[in-house]
Image (cartoon, coloured by chain):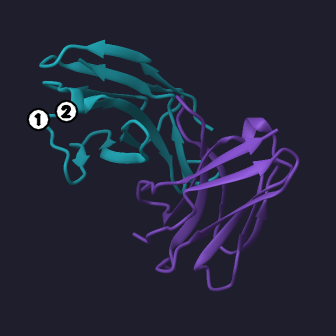
Amino acid sequence: LAKTTQPISMDSYEGQEVNITCSHNNIATNDYITWYQQFPSQGPRFIIQGYKTKVTNEVASLFIPADRKSSTLSLPRVSLSDTAVYYCLVGDLNTPLVFGKGTRLSVIA
Amino acid sequence: SAVISQKPSRDICQRGTSLTIQCQVDSQVTMMFWYRQQPGQSLTLIATANQGSEATYESGFVIDKFPISRPNLTFSTLTVSNMSPEDSSIYLCSVGSFRGQGMGTDTQYFGPGTRLTVL
């Protein structure tokens, strides 16, 4: 399984765009990149998933360069309610997700 | 997406006892997973539970300590046996939406978790 590296923590002010970058140098051909969000005392919630280039949904955008060795989760105009831990996961969709340490995002008023 | 419920939502138990956690899904799924999240830590996969076969445990987890049942495609239980304070964690059930199951994006969905405290 590809190992992922992401910042342990980030701070942002409300209304700003937040970009969280994840490194996954050993990503395999069959691997997808998936991001989850977890609030305290809740299970992780799926945010976005991609294989290459750019993916956008109503919550976030995911940018994946051509070599796929990294990815960036972009959260537009964050609010206090976006304070959470964000996990970057890389893996074959036919195997269970393996979680790394995640990035603790704190949004400040 | 799948709706997953777990019972109990939380419990406080005495050491040496056992607790069975239930996971119910609102649709039939082939693959179910159990994770543990220790305080302040990330999630760790305990085992994969497929209906009709024995659960597959990850390194560091054994069936005697964490027996799992999977009687049908919408239900599973995880038992934490002979508990010690080190078992205090949140236990999460997850279901997989893999290619062909038609649950939307191929990924996993998680239940709300069961917060276990062992005294």
- The residue singled out by tag 2 in the image is B67
Q: Is residue B93 left or right of residue B65?
A: right
Q: Residue at x 64, y 52 (%)?
A: B105
User: In which quadrant is the C terminus of chain A drawn?
Assistant: top right
- Mark 1 neighbour class, 10 Å CA radius: few under 14, some 14 to 19, many 20 or more: few
The colour with which the image depicts chain B is: cyan
Q: Are marks 1 and 2 in contact (CB under 8 Å)?
A: yes
In the rendering, at what x and y percent does residue B118 appear?
A: 25, 20
Q: Are marks 1 and 2 on the same chain?
A: yes
Q: Residue at x 69, y 80 (%)?
A: A65
Q: Residue at x 40, y 17 (%)?
A: B10
In the rendering, at what x and y percent does residue B89 appear?
A: 34, 31
Q: Residue at x 38, y 42 (%)?
A: B33
Q: Nearer the viewer, residue B25 or A58?
A: A58
Residue B104 makes an appearance in the image: no
In the rendering, at what x and y percent does residue B6 appear?
A: 44, 22
Could you tell me which chain the residue with mark 2 belongs to?
B
- The residue singled out by tag 1 in the image is B64
Q: Is residue A13 left or right of residue B118?
A: right
The colour with which the image depicts chain A is: purple
